[in-house]
Image (cartoon, rainbow, N blue to C red):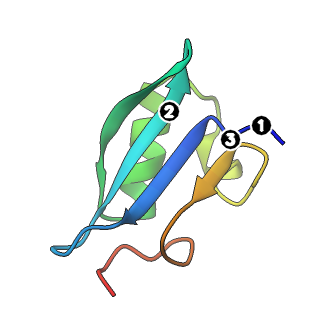
Amino acid sequence: MATPPITIHAPTPSGGRLVTVHINSRDEKLGMAHSDQDLVVFLADAGLANPELILNNPAVVQWQGAAAHRYESA
């Protein structure tokens, strides 16, 4: 199985999750999301149409280190 192109990394100790996209064989940082709204903005700015529709699609988005849609540290 290929790695999903968008990774939502584990929450940082201060809260928030790094968002990266895999493009041209490398990961590029899109920003630090503190909410789904931040995430939608980052993905829209990266050129995805209707990004709110893919947040729960594991073929496209991989949530690491914590439950999906959780941004606070454990």
| Residue type highlighted by circle 1 | Ala
**First of labels 3, 2 by sequence position:** 3
Q: CA distance from mark 3 to mark 2?
A: 9 Å
Above/below status of 12 relative to 18: below
Disc nearest the viewer among 1 and 3: 1
Task: Quadrant for the N terminus, please.
Answer: top right
Q: What residue does disc 2 label?
A: 21
Above/below status of 18 relative to 66: above
Q: CA distance from mark 1 to mark 3?
A: 6 Å
Figure label count: 3
> At which x and y percent is residue 27?
45, 28
Q: What residue does disc 1 label?
A: 2
Report which quarter residue 41 is drawn in: top left
- Residue 36 located left or right of residue 2: left
Q: What residue does disc 3 label?
A: 4
> At which x and y percent is residue 9?
43, 57
Mark 2 surroundings: few (<14), some (14-19) or many (≥20) residues within 10 A: some
Label at residue 55: none
> At which x and y percent is residue 53?
70, 50
Helix, strand or loop at mark 2: strand
Q: Please name whichever residue, 68 or 49, is drawn nearer the observer in this view of the structure.
A: 68
Q: CA distance from mark 1 to mark 2?
A: 13 Å
